[in-house]
Image (cartoon, helix red, strand yellow):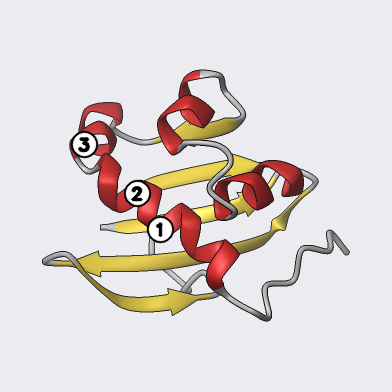
Amino acid sequence: MVVEYRLAENESRAGQIEVKSGEVVRAGAPAEGVKPDFVLTAKVETWQRLGEGELPAAKAMVTRKVKFRGSMSVALANLPGLEAAMKMFGQIDDTDWSVN
């Protein structure tokens, strides 16, 4: 499963993670020719709130603070992992929150 994260303010600022058997096997810039199964787009402020654990992933998707493309049933079945992935942003010391 490949999940792509984008900034609403600048969708060219994106990252991907690839998960196989519950393990992240690749993370970083979108890979050439790799079509994501899910695309999540949100404003910087929303990603920060998710990363800090202030905003639950399910609430962010239901309220459309995170725009979501992909199978909602698959996403909901994997919600704990998706929520953990969103919190990762807050745990990475060098996360660049700028929109430039």
Query: What is the spatial separation of the Cα atoms under label 3 and label 1, in whole angstroms?
Result: 15 Å
> Looking at the image, how many numbered discs can be counted on the residues?
3
Q: Determine the CA span between mark 1 and mark 2.
A: 5 Å
Q: In the rendered image, which quarter is residue 63 located in?
A: top right
Q: Are marks 3 and 1 in contact (CB under 8 Å)?
A: no
- Quick one: quadrant of the N terminus? bottom left
Q: Quadrant of residue 38?
A: top left
Circles 1 and 2 in contact, beta carbons < 8 Å:
yes
Q: The C terminus lies in which quarter of the figure?
A: bottom right
Residue beneath the point at 48% across and 26% down: 59
Question: Which is nearer the N-term, disc 3 or disc 1?
Answer: 3
- Residue 18 location, x and y as percent? 32, 68
Residue marked by disc 1? 85
Question: Which of label 3 and label 1 is nearer to you?
Answer: 1
Tell me if residue 98 comes above or below residue 63 in the rendering. Answer: below
* Residue depicted at 47% across the width and 45% down the height: 39
- 63 vs 12, left or right, is left
What's the amino acid at mark 1?
Ala
Amino acid type at image mark 2: Leu
